[in-house]
Amino acid sequence: MASDDSAERRTMSVISEIKRHLRRALAKACVALTGLTLAFMLAPVW
């Protein structure tokens, strides 16, 4: 029973780790997308 509990806890930690990485990647993608959008919007002005 104890081993099953530890396995579950390990799975949860792995999932939380993956979520953190995904959130960071998503934030970077949003920043990049915003930067590109602004660049395209400002390009005609230049």
Image (cartoon, helix red, strand yellow):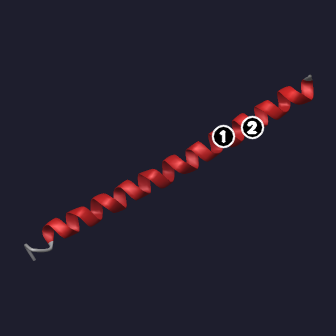
Tally of numbered discs: 2
Residue at the image point whose x is 62% and y is 46% from the top: 18
| Amino acid type at mark 2 | Thr
C-beta proximity under 8 Å, tags 1 and 2: yes
Residue 21 rendering spot, x and y as whole percentages? 57, 50
- Quarter of image, res 10: top right
Query: In the rendered image of this protein, does residue 24 appear above or below residue 42?
Result: above
Give how far apart the Cα atoms at labels 1 and 2 are.
Answer: 6 Å
Quickly name the residue at label 1. 15
Residue at the image point whose x is 21% and y is 63% from the top: 38
Quadrant of the rendering where the N terminus is positioned: top right
Q: Residue furthest bottom?
A: 46
Query: In the rendered image of this protein, does residue 19 appear above or below residue 38?
Result: above
- Left or right: residue 45 versus residue 11 is left
| Amino acid type at mark 1 | Ile
Residue at the image point whose x is 43% and y is 57% from the top: 28
Q: Residue furthest left?
A: 45
Quickly name the residue at label 2. 11
